[in-house]
Amino acid sequence: MNNTFTNKKINSLKAENLDWSLIQAQMKSKLGLDIYESWLKKINFVEEFNNYILLSVPTRFIRDWVTSRYLDQILQIVKTYRRDIIRIEFKIVEQNLSLVEKEKNLEQLSTNENISFIKDSFLQYNRIDPNKKFENFVTGSSNKLAFEASLKVSENISQYNPLYIYGGVGMGKTHLLNSIGFELKNNNKIMFISAERFMYQFVKSIKANEMVKFKEYFRNTDVLIIDDIQFMNGKEAMQEEFFHTFNALIDKGSQIVLSADRPPNKLSRIQERIKSRFSGGLVVDIQKPDSELRKKIVEKKTEELKSFHAGELKISKDTQDFISKEITSNIRELVGAINRIVSFSRIYNKTPNLAEVKIVLKDLLNLSENKVTIDLIQTLVCKFFKISKNEMLSSRRSRYLVRPRQTAIYLAKILTSKSLPEIGREFSNRDHTTIIHSVKTIEKLKEKDDLMVDNINKLKNQILYNKENEI
Ligand code: ADP
Ligand code: MG
């Protein structure tokens, strides 16, 4: 059985030392290169204990950041090698990497893949993210053309040259560029760089008197991929160099792929002849995703995450529908929203209900907090319990008024940033101790009374998202 096999694997591994480089590789592939490079690479293994491991990080800040965001997932990865480990501890060890070590690190980064390598920082920005491939690019009417053109380029170099993809932020441009690089990197020398980086390298090379190297380096690539070309706004000399590089590459049959947030003719501060070169191949755009595509992306991403978190992930169909209906601006936000819900579900080990989803995604949903007023809370709570506002604000203590009043106070506390005295004032100048008492009462009731939990959730829903409840 599968289980037996896994157990065996775990046991046989147990005898050996925990191989941190394996964990690092997993973190890289599961959490993405960006996150790995920014945060996780800096974590070192110190020691393994009975049921926990000790790691070191260079600063308190990194420790806090990693703990608050990635600890769960790191532990998950560690657990695949060491089932007994139930927690991770950190100590802070300032690192003063010697030069030799630094060089060694750089060397390790230059994999044996055919991605061009030039000493120092060129490499840092020439990384293909293995998580952004054609396979996990979901297509719909808004991005189909860009997708197909990218695919063609990756099958047959210099058929569309250059390929110029444009569209707003978070629409998948970098994802497509990366996919092209990923497909082609085994058989071609690839240079994947942002325009900003390109300029930076250019200026640096001039200063260091290394222009020859710079030219050679760029003119030597088979596939030059430049992301966010709208940021290319350098001086004449740089545009000159770029123009020549561009022409030299096209002449020798190298592929050029560019992305931007606008079409070539709308680029500012770029020479006309360069713009016209940009338009000389194939220009395709990516539009905002329609609801069908958003739905597909939400489904696909949820599936992906489900398979990664093996069965412990719970996201309801309602939540999926809600996200794809409400997050319309771009795909990055859509993906971000799903990730957040997944984190929530894992941290609290539960399927978030819609009210919780709305809270977790609040800032993405145009439901800014200042729209939630105590007055709104009172109105909706009164309506819900069928009492009048006068009754709610009165000093009468009949049972049928006390609970709704306490509920409204509780909701005011958790859904607004008002202080206790401020809340008290809006409830007919009640004392802040009364407010604390109400909040505590509801919290206690919630622990044992399912109906209370249900009511609170329904109310939260209405308050945070009162589109249907025009009042
Ligand atoms: P852009 O470069 O246009 O700003 P990105 O390529 O960085 O956008 O995309 C933002 C996020 O959305 C990335 O995580 C990317 O993987 C994801 N994404 C974008 N488009 C798609 C798509 N069609 N299918 C799956 N994921 C997508
Ligand atoms: Mg991008």
Image: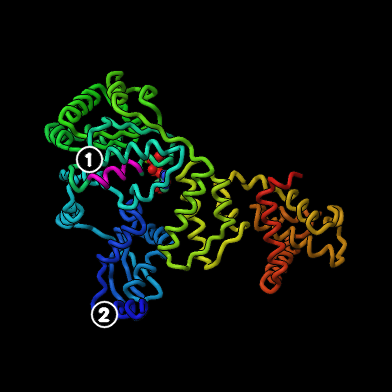
SS label for mark 1: strand
- Segment tinted magenta in the rendering: 176-184
**Where is the C terminus found, in terms of image quarters?**
top right
The residue lying at 70 percent from left, 47 percent from top is: 468
Quarter of the image where one finds residue 201: top left
Amino acid type indicated by mark 2: Ser
Instruction: Give the image location of residue 387, x and y in percent.
Output: 85, 57
Residue bearing mark 2: 12
Instruction: Give the image location of residue 367, x and y in percent.
Output: 62, 46
What secondary structure characterizes most of the magenta part?
A: helix
Q: Is the residue at mark 1 in contact range of ligand 2, meaning its CB lies under 8 Å from it?
A: no
Residue bearing mark 1: 191
Left-right relation of 215 to 151: left
Q: How dense is the environment of label 1, judged by Cα within 10 Å: few (below 14), some, or many (20 and up)? A: many
Left-right relation of 209 to 394: left
Marks 1 and 2 close (CB-CB < 8 Å): no
Closer to the N terminus: mark 1 or mark 2? 2
